[in-house]
Image (tube, helix red, strand yellow):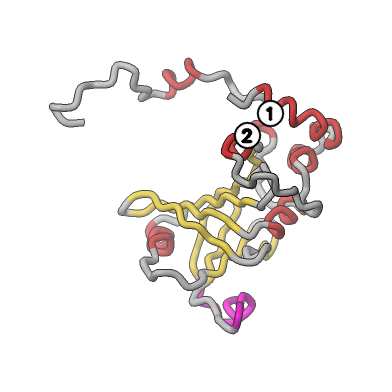
Amino acid sequence: MDALTPADPFAVATLEQLATLYDPPRELVLKKVIPRLEPKAMAFIAASPFAILATVGPDGVHASPRGDDPGFIVPLDDRTLALPDRRGNNRLDALRDIIANPAVALLFLVPGVGEALRVNGTARITADPSLRERFTAQGKVPTTVVLVTVREAYMQCAKSVMRSKLWGERARPRAVPSMGELIAAHTGGAVDPASYDAEAPQRLRDIMY
């Protein structure tokens, strides 16, 4: 802030200030974070044709869209995701960032589904010929593959997608696990999936704003 810019008397600059403005998270919100990918999270990723990859490097933060046929990002095991680097504009913002700082985040979206899957971890870049060949699409082999080591994964509720009406009236694919199923899997059965999903529409409307 320069000398000509007045100070904001309402600025929130400390964790203590932040804590006075928001209610604490519910216990379930904290318990739903898992350190690896279980089958339902993998099923969500398999249904996702679009993800946002967030990276940070010497020039700041970048968020880059990544998309292809559903399941284009592949779990190699329960702690590793493989993301082919399809042809782009060769700015290589995300790849340059990963070399400087391996911390990454992925946000998975599925058309027609309100919830999103968030994955945080670290990444490295490989030019392994056999792995690149595995991701051949329309005769084109990706130049590199980004390997993400999962540190934590958790579901984001549907409120932001509902508020934005992002998918309009598009129907939810049946193969995608529900929020209740995912939370039950991620918390060791802390909720009943059917009850959670049945109550979700009204609950989300009640806390939309």
Q: Is residue 130 above or below residue 61?
A: below
Query: Residue 199: percent from the left, percent from the top?
Result: 79, 28
> Does residue 93 lie above or below 182 as drawn?
below
Q: What segment is highlighted magenta in the picture?
A: 126-138
Identify whether 75 is placed above or below 180: below
- How far across and down, in percent of the image, does residue 107 sit? 57, 49
On-image quarter of the C terminus: top right
Q: Quadrant of residue 4?
A: top left
- Between the residue at mark 1 and the residue at mark 2, the CA separation in whole angstroms equals 6 Å
Mark identifier at residue 204: 1
The image position of residue 67, as x and y in percent, is 57, 62
Q: Are marks 1 and 2 in contact (CB under 8 Å)?
A: yes
Q: Quadrant of the N terminus?
A: top left
Q: Which numbered tag is attached to residue 55?
A: none
Residue 196 among magenta residues: no
Q: Earlier in the sequence, mark 1 or mark 2?
A: 2
Residue located beneath label 2 in the image: 159
Residue at figure coordinates x 75%, y 31% from the top left: 200
Q: Amino acid at mark 1?
A: Leu
Q: Dot 1 lies on which element?
A: helix
Residue at position x 61%, y 25% in the image: 25
The residue furthest left is 3
Which of 167 and 156 lies nearest the eye of the viewer? Answer: 167
Q: Which secondary structure, mark 2? A: helix
Question: Would you call the spot at circle 2 few (<14 residues within 10 Å), some (14-19), or many (20 or more)?
Answer: some
